[in-house]
Image (cartoon, rainbow, N blue to C red):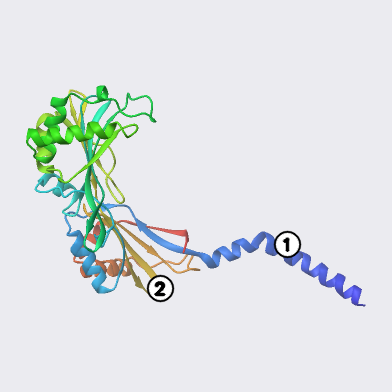
Amino acid sequence: MNKQKAILILLLLIPLLLVLFFFGPFLLFSFVDSSWYYSEEVDIGHLDYNSVLTNAENVGYEVEGSWPWLGNFSGFEPGDVPEVRERFGSAALVENIRLNYDKNSELMVIACENESETEAGTRTGTGTCVAISNLSHSDPESPLQLSEFPPDVWMLEKFGLLFGLDEEVSEKYLNVLKKAAQNQTWDAEIQVNESPDFPAVYAYLMENSDKSDYGSSLGINAYPTEVFLKDGKRLGSVKYFVPEAKVTAYDNENRYIVELDASGKVRLEIVMPPGSSGDTIPEDEYQAVFREIFEEMGLSPEAVDSFEFFHSSSRIW
């Protein structure tokens, strides 16, 4: 009797197990999957990046990304260069500057970690690294030869341009760079105490080039590079750091997300809770929530009307 019951139970379980095997993932997916809304990126114009994120934090929204400022990234202040501020916003930094001697050789300035001794101990801050490289240098394991450096007159001129130095100090740095090349491989690099005079460098690139363009697209997580050409040859380039952040607010268990960068590029998103697959939110309702979020952050609520939203039920929470 017990054997018959066992066989009967097994016969009942086999179809059930088959059903679970084939349809179980779909049933589980329906509980985990959520509906979401998203927009394409929109340029809402000038915004005060730091102020917007400060307002968001004060209201109680979650803020992630390139903020607070300290410790998130390094770069140089652009200074009074209207073209850069208008295009990338007041919070953008210069990540590196490259000046080209020819198609193979370039002088690069970049922000780098700098350790200094203080009474309290070693302190790490942002310094300025200067490097010379030559793409025709064939052996990456060998030092850069002095014959592979650009002419001294060009190097001295560029040191003076980059840091506002006289010829004597420029020559001192050039000699240090040449000496460093003997103990390094592939390229030569030194640290200097000065920060680059970016307005002077940018003016030089603008005045001496006949064309400029960007080597990468702009937007969220962008590091745009402005390339300057003269007679079709590369004169120099500037790579910018455009900070970006994600602000998250909650309404009725729905996550309202605002992704923005310092240049004014914004993308919006709504993620509904698990199991909401197929559910929707009335357009006037979610637009009202975003308008309130924008107003709390110090952005124009009317800017929400510029976004077109798309709905999907395929996002995992």
What residue type is disc 1 on? Leu
In the image, residue 236 above or below residue 31 = above
Q: Position of residue 247 (x, y in %)?
A: 30, 64
Q: Position of residue 272 (x, y in %)?
A: 42, 67
Looking at the rendered structure, the secondary structure element under dot 1 is helix
Is 289 in front, or is 262?
262
What residue type is disc 2 on? Glu
Residue denoted by label 1:
18
Q: Residue at x 65, y 61 (%)?
A: 23
State if disc 2 and disc 1 touch (CB < 8 Å): no
Judge from the rendering whether residue 295 lies leftward or rightward of residue 18; answer left or right.
left
Is 101 in front, or is 254?
101
In the image, residue 126 above or below residue 136 = below
In the image, residue 159 above or below residue 76 = above
The N terminus is located in which quarter? bottom right
Judge from the rendering whether residue 254 lies leftward or rightward of residue 307; answer left or right.
right
Is 196 in front, or is 118?
118
Residue furthest front as drawn: 119
Q: Residue at x 23, y 56 (%)?
A: 117
Is 104 in front, or is 272?
104
Which of the labelled discs sits on residue 261, or is there none? none
Distance between mark 1 and mark 2 Cα atoms: 36 Å
Q: Position of residue 75 (x, y in %)?
A: 22, 49
Q: Is residue 205 visible?
A: no
Q: Is residue 42 visible?
A: yes
Residue 225: image quadrant is top left
Looking at the rendered structure, the secondary structure element under dot 2 is loop
Residue denoted by label 2:
253
Q: Position of residue 210 (x, y in %)?
A: 14, 28
Residue furthest bottom as drawn: 1
